Image (spheres, rainbow, N blue to C red):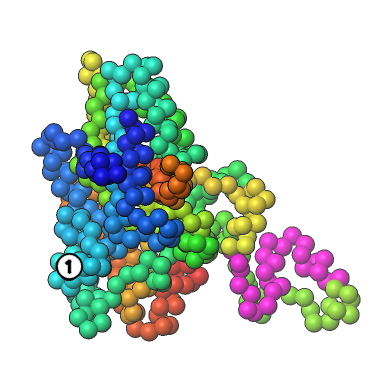
Amino acid sequence: MQIIKYTALSLLLALTTSAFAQTNINPSRKQAIDSLALEKVKDLSKYISIIGSKDTQFSEAKRVMDRAEELFAEDSEMGVSSLESEEISYFKVRDYFERLMALNYDKVKIQWYDIHYVSDLEQQPDGTYVGVITIYQRFEGTSKDGSLSYKDTTKKDITIYVKKKETQIAGRIIEFWDVLLGDIKVTETTA
Amino acid sequence: MRILLAFILGICTMQSSVGQGRLTDDMRETQEQLNASTKQINQFFRRFNGEEDKNGKRYYETDKQYHSTNLRNQYMPVLFDTQTGQIDRKLAEKFISTITDKKSPVFLDFHQDDWLAEVNTTFTYKGKKVPGTLYMRLQQQGQGYEWIIDNVSFDVFSSKFDKDTTESKKFLHPMSHELEFMTLRKAFADNQHNEQFTGKDFETDYLSIFLYEMNMGNLKFVTVKNVSFHFFSVEGYYFSLANFNRSGYNSGWLISSLVALANEDEKQQMKNYLYGKN
């Protein structure tokens, strides 16, 4: 279903734009790309909630981690900072998910604020466009006996890479814009 | 084809924001504060320029409100840090009236403006943790742009350079050439400050030292501690941006200092100060 959804959204990006190659991203195309990027971010947030939940079976969590990893460009990292420390800890995306799954709480509740900020897309030297989507997550972890209780709100600044690709449909070359997630900066907030 | 398009559009409209609804009361309050927060530098640019509405909806050039003076006048006061008392209120008002002047308004330009990032970092130098600052600028490259390291400031390097310019400083006497510079042996022996033997216009190139030590493997990156931004985009002013990670409605990337610059000399002095050259 996910593949169908992304393909459909990608094709919309192809269908709503000219068949000819264009370097610039005009506002309507930008909005369509934003929709596809937000769809991927929304899926990531859903996957994080499933991976973090203590109700999720180990095998299911592993499967969801695989799906979540597919959203990312190769070598993507999470840089995590907390209020206690000035320094940022860096994790591979898979390691971050595994740490989230292994947290020592009996109950974990992950919620997402109804906020997203999507930056402009900037072209990098190789022609790929890059942008950042900011979202906020609320985490609550508790142990059965109440000895362990923690909650925080984290800001997640998520890199998105937007690249023009080609596919062949019924003998015709169709160009479309593909979106992949990249490095994520996770910042603990005072909220 | 129409059916396919309708299907695709249907899927698109299904997508909404990331949040899943059912927020608790305290989360609702926090959400309002987070909405007010200037979440990215990109959002600071948009708010400064009047390119988004109060709910964060983007304005494009074709929108009537795009770059609206009224909108900017509403936004600008909340783009200053109002809690630490570092900003002179009268200077801020003058600044706002300069940038929103109806005849010649000033807008920020991500690519063209004179601005830089100050990145405070931790490295290890020969195994020991050391702090250091990287000064970064945007540069046009290939099909787009990239951030480049414009300069660096590391105490571990600058403490090694303290040029003595007094008459009693060490020197190579003016007849050394007749001795085929055998005087060098004594000059360099047990000397921690060989910069004494350089010309009057010598300036230490810390960026080259940084790159050399990195490439030799002596200096290794550990982490970024914090970032701030410095702008010389508005004639007659310097301002900096810092990230205020705090609760309330005055948070995120905000103007943390504002200084009036009378002329080019003062502008250069400010740049030298930022680059640690004073």
- The residue indicated by pointer 1 is B65
The quarter of the picture where the N terminus of chain B appears is: top left
Figure check: B231 above or below B124? below
Image point (49%, 65%), residue name? B139
Residue A92 position, x and y percent, is 47, 35
Image point (67%, 50%), residue name? B216
Kindly indicate the quadrant of the structure image that contains residue A81: top left
Kindly indicate the quadrant of the structure image that contains residue B73: bottom left
Figure check: B29 above or below B171? above
Residue B62 position, x and y percent, is 23, 67
Q: In the rendered structure, which amino acid carries the disc numbered 1?
A: Gln
Residue A36 position, x and y percent, is 32, 44
Q: Residue furthest right?
A: B179
- Out of B113 and A22, give the one closest to the viewer: A22
Q: Which residues are magenta?
A: B182-206
- Out of A155 and B156, give the one closest to the viewer: A155
Q: Is residue B199 magenta?
A: yes
Image point (53%, 58%), residue name? B154
Q: Residue furthest left?
A: B25
Kindly indicate the quadrant of the structure image that contains residue A95: top left
Q: Secondary structure at mark 1?
A: loop
Q: Is residue B107 visible?
A: yes
Image point (28%, 53%), residue name? A31
Q: Is residue B225 visible?
A: no
Residue A173 position, x and y percent, is 46, 48
Figure check: B41 above or below B170? above
Figure check: A152 above or below B163? above
Q: Is residue B9 magenta?
A: no
Disc 1 sits on a residue from what chain?
A: B
Q: Quick check: B195 left or right of A104?
A: right
Q: Quick check: B26 left or right of B260?
A: left
